[in-house]
């Protein structure tokens, strides 16, 4: 069978060669109806575009590299979903790697991505130094990492932490806990801890760090959460506890353990997560969460591939109240 060509697509879909070329390079310039006609022709002809050959000829690519620390968290998986959604509108395709071992390993992954002549790199890991990133020959858009002469998309973490604390204080909590899997003071996410601790600074407060919560879908994470819930309920028996988790996945694991032990949420313990990811809505009791506006972050990242300017975009924090915190009656 002869390999289908662009001329075959144009003939089958009833449009010009220019329109087909525009579909592959700037699909946003075409109407939905025209895109549908071309997509139907591509499927009927079983056409496969040779992206590497195209990039060698034109010097341009529609491929974008993305590096996550891992994909355990609902925040990362939802961000990837949103990147794909907005990237499709611009004709981008993504090559996704995870990197949580070493700076050297990540630099090797990036060299592999560069061999595909990627248009740009979206970076969520924290392994590279700012100077490593600044030396790369493609636009780099970082999400939730601090510093450097490149495009950064960060969340207003400090306000997010304050919003969580203010709600728990308003709802009459007597003890305040922050549960996290890890932190570093140079991570933007550390500011959510600072915001929370600033508001509860004169109250009974404890910060709980458990590295097993990095992947909440493991047996060890469940065991550690069981031990943590037992310890805090014994230590603070008779007190109303307000819990703020660093992400929705940890909050969901915490909620499950409370339900197993017959602890009433939100009567005995109030719970706030972070990200407002799908995990917060799919929990048995939908979890009150700080919305990171993941969709907007993805949209800004995709737009920034065309706008290679080194500035920071700050996404505002919004509290989304659900069933794990008390709601004041009107």
Image (cartoon, rainbow, N blue to C red):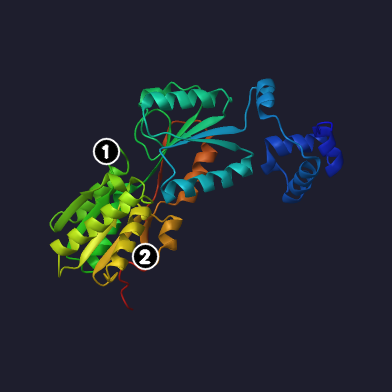
Q: Is residue 151 above or below residue 162?
A: above
Residue 259 position, x and y percent, is 31, 67
Instruction: Give the crowd class for mark 1: few <14, some 14-19, many >=20 residues within 10 Å.
Output: few
Rendered image quadrant of residue 106: top left
Foreground residue, 115 or 317?
A: 115
Rendered image quadrant of residue 101: top left
Element type at mark 2: loop
Q: Is residue 50 above or below residue 267?
A: above
Instruction: Give the crowd class for mark 2: few <14, some 14-19, many >=20 residues within 10 Å.
Output: some
Q: Which mark is residue 293?
A: none
Q: Residue at x 41, y 48 (%)?
A: 73
Q: Residue furthest bottom?
A: 330
Q: Quick one: quadrant of the N terminus?
A: top right
Residue 196 position, x and y percent, is 24, 53
33 horizontally vs 270: left or right: right
Q: Which residue is mark 1?
A: 184
Q: Which residue is mark 2?
A: 321
Give the number of the mark in front: 1 or 2: 1
């Amino acid at each position: 069978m002869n390999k289908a060509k662009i001329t075959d697509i144009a003939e089958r879909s009833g449009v010009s060669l220019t329109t087909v070329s525009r579909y592959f390079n700037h699909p946003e310039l075409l109407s939905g109806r025209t895109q549908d006609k071309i997509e139907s022709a591509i499927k009927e002809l079983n056409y496969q575009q040779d992206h590497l050959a195209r990039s060698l000829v034109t010097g341009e690519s529609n491929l974008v590299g993305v590096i996550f620390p891992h994909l355990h968290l609902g925040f990362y998986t939802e961000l990837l979903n949103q990147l794909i959604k907005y990237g499709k509108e611009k004709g981008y395709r993504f090559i996704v790697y995870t990197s949580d071992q070493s700076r050297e390993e990540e630099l090797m992954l990036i060299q592999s991505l560069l061999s595909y002549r990627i248009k740009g790199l979206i970076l969520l890991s924290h392994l590279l130094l700012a100077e490593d990133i600044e030396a790369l020959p493609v636009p780099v858009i970082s999400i939730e990492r601090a510093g450097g002469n490149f495009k950064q998309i960060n969340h207003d973490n400090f306000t997010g932490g304050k919003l969580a604390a203010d709600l728990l204080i308003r709802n009459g909590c007597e003890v305040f806990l922050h549960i996290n899997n890890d932190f570093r003071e140079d991570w933007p996410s550390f500011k959510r801890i600072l915001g929370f601790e600033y508001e509860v600074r004169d109250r009974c407060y404890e910060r709980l760090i458990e590295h097993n919560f990095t992947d909440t879908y493991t047996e060890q994470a469940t065991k550690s959460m069981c031990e943590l819930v037992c310890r805090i309920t014994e230590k603070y028996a008779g007190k109303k506890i307000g819990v703020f988790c660093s992400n929705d996945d940890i909050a969901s694991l915490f909620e499950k353990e409370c339900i197993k032990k017959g602890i009433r949420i939100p009567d005995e313990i109030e719970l706030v997560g972070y990200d407002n990811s799908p995990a917060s809505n799919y929990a048995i009791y939908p979890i009150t969460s700080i919305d990171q506006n993941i969709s907007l972050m993805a949209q800004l990242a995709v737009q920034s591939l065309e706008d290679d300017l080194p500035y920071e975009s700050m996404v505002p924090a919004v509290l989304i109240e659900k069933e794990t915190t008390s709601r004041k009656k009107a």
